[in-house]
Image (tube, grey):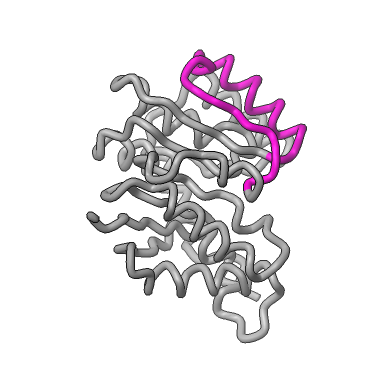
Amino acid sequence: MIDTITNIAIEDYLAALMPPRTGALAELEQRAAQQGLALVGPVQGQLLYILARTMGARQALEVGTTTGYAAIWILQALQPVGGHLTVIESESRRYQLAHEFFAKAHVSNDVTLHQGQWKDILPRLNLASYDLIFLDILRSLTADDQALQALHMCVALLRPGGLLIGDNVLCSAQVLEDQPPPTVRGIQLFNQALMRHPELESTIVPLRDGVSISRKKDA
């Protein structure tokens, strides 16, 4: 198995170019380094921010937040236009951590934080209402049909012209394996469906663990 899809030295170089983070983002990065928490990191965080800011997103959804780090980057793009972020997290400790750091980042009033399973909460949200969706649960899915289920549900929630961004879509290069475990097989099926989806225009960027970017076609 290949452990990485990018040159670590290049990743370090890109991270070093980023302006220093302050406040909640800086504290989260420090805590992640000390406690081994998973973060998208500043380079991918900046990508999320730029995509959301460029398209003028006002309503965004994050499926799986872990720490709230990526959410804070997205919120930096939403706040200037009075936008709002809906967040879903199933794990109690992660939910509490995100709640803590949303308060520290002074963004709590701009976030609706749901605790529960994504497959239970997504059907309760308004169809075609989100400008941007960040799907960050693919590595945690245990059955090979769950990633496709998440894809179809997210596409239904996305407005025409909106963006669906997926994380970990190259899964430490395990997507190259012929007989991968169910989680990776699910990601392989997700990528195939994403690139062939009749409602999406998509690309996959080999940044960190792989980032997919899809635009929902105009109606």
Residue placed most toward the observer, 44 or 110: 110
- Residue at 24% x, 38% y: name it: 54
> Residue 50 is drawn in which quadrant?
top left
In the displayed structure image, the side of residue 115 where residue 12 appears, left or right:
left
Looking at the image, residue 2 lies above or below residue 88: below
Query: Residue drawn 42% across and 62% down?
Result: 206
Single out the residue that lies furthest toward the right. 92
- Residue 196 seen anywhere in this rendered image of the structure: yes
- Left-right relation of 100 to 25: right
| Residue 107 lies in the magenta-colored region | yes
Q: Is residue 39 above or below residue 96?
A: below
Q: Position of residue 14 (x, y in %)?
A: 39, 46
Residue range (magenta): 90-118
- In the image, residue 182 lies at what x, y percent? 70, 72
Q: Quadrant of residue 24?
A: top right
Q: Is residue 69 magenta?
A: no
Quarter of the image for the N terminus: give it: bottom right
Which residue is painted at 68% across and 59% down in the image?
A: 141
How many circles with numbers are drawn on the protein? 0
Residue at figure coordinates x 74%, y 36% from the top left: 35
Report whether residue 14 is seen.
Answer: no
Quarter that holds the C terminus: bottom left
Q: Residue furthest bottom?
A: 178
Examine the rendered structure and indicate whether residue 38 appears above or below residue 189.
above
Q: Is residue 84 left or right of residue 188?
A: left
Q: Position of residue 101 (x, y in %)?
A: 60, 22
Q: Quadrant of residue 211?
A: bottom left
Give the percent coordinates (x, y) of residue 132.
38, 42
Depth order, front residue of 23/79:
79
Left-right relation of 147 to 158: right
149 or 108: which is nearer to us? 149
